[in-house]
Amino acid sequence: MTGRVIRFPRLPLSSESGREAAEKVLATPFERRYEMAEALQLEDPETILSLCLHLRPKLESSPSLVRDEAEFLYRYIQTPRRDIGLFDEREYFLGEAALLAGTACRQLSRRDEAHVWFDRAEAGFRHTINAVADLSRLSYQRLAERVEERQFDVVLEMLPALIESFQQLEMHDEALKCRFLEGMALLESDELTSAVRVFDEIVAEAERLGNSRLLGTAFATLTNIYGMMGNAEGALAASARAIPVLRRLDDRVALVPEVPRRDRGRVVRVVLPDLGPVALAVVGRLDLASIRTLFRMSSERRSAVSPAHAP
Amino acid sequence: MWFQRLGRRGGAGHMPAKMLRLSLLSAACQYGRSFQLWKLGGKPSPDKSLNDVLSREPEEVATDLDLRFGKEAP
């Protein structure tokens, strides 16, 4: 008969102290963190959890920062091996840091790097208690990456099983995000009528769940689809509902319109609330993610990109 | 402390109650098993039912308990 006797580590930080410790870590340059690790309480699970929770909301607005911080965290926990927290926490933190880094790489269109980070996330999550929820979040990111790689058939084939998993786990927001991927895959496949149907269903579900972010983004996407269909009335109605929601959320990135394939390669003039007109040179096969990355960069600098050049 | 952090994994509201319950049962089973094995010091227990439980994976025992609670819930 075998069994692992669980050790009891020193008293951990409280949640509040963990948040304060995380702020100190983030304010410390990477190269100084190793020598200051004890003072920074960098091995405390509360500090690491707070770092993860702090970084997650910054994925859209500051993916470079998230990537660098998540990579630091992953490397710190991994090598030399540090026994952090209780039970499965070390493996969870490795998985979460890798998922954050991979998602940030996806936002930055660093696709090869994203694939490697997603593999690392899987290796971590596989050893956690009830890994299915975290592995499902990882599957969502992998499918989102495939949307950006234009593998729409694969995405549409794999999505129903993932949606079912999220529904069984009662993770309704995540299930709705999957519907969003379905809509994007249909949109990019030029199946515009089906895409409208999916986004209408997303709007209804997002209203039911009270998820303003998905609601605003769904309206913004409907605006673009109606625009691509030449349905000005539908586009105006959807944008009238999108703008107040996105303004409340201060989300300007979601308002960057999808550019129909026929217009790619031309300079497209985009009007953004509060920023005025921005000219983006949409070159060659530049996709929506890249356009948003350009816009994010311009937004961070608080100046327009005019005009951008081919990568 | 572990469970309190478990509830905050992945951001607010990420982990549904159903998963939290199963995770808590898994952790309790793992702790309970470790404790009993330590008490027995490598010898089998005179209680056959305890030996049967200890011979199973803690996750498996937790899943069975969770299913039983699910059936008993109104």
Image (cartoon, coloured by chain):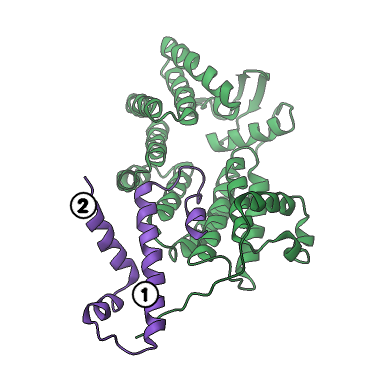
Compared with A202, A58 (above or below) is: below
Q: Which residue is mark 1?
A: B33
The amino acid type found where label 2 is placed reads: Glu
Identify which residue, A270 or B66, lies in the foreground.
Answer: B66
Image coords of residue A227 (percent x, y):
46, 18
Q: Secondary structure at mark 2?
A: helix
Q: Quadrant of residue A107?
A: top right
Q: Chain of mark 1?
A: B
* Chain identifier, purple in the render: B
Please state the horizontal and vertical placement of residue A34, each as a whole percent of the image.
74, 65
Q: For chain A, what colour was chosen?
A: green
Q: Residue at x 22, y 82 (%)?
A: B48
Mark number displayed over residue B53: none
Q: Which residue is mark 2?
A: B72
- Mark 1: secondary structure: helix
Whole-percent x and y of residue A87? 48, 67
In this picture, residue A274 sits left or right of residue B22: right
Q: Pointer 1: residues within 10 angstroms few (<14), some, or many (20+)?
A: many
Identify the chain of the residue marked 2, using the numbered disc in the image: B
Locate the N terminus of chain A and report the quarter of the image it occupies.
Answer: bottom left
Q: Tell me if residue A73 can be seen.
A: yes
The quadrant of the picture occupied by the C terminus of chain A is: top right
Q: Nearer the viewer, residue A50 or B42?
A: B42
In the orientation shown, which residue stands out farthest toward the top?
A: A233
Q: Whole-Å distance between the Cαs marked 2 and 1?
A: 24 Å
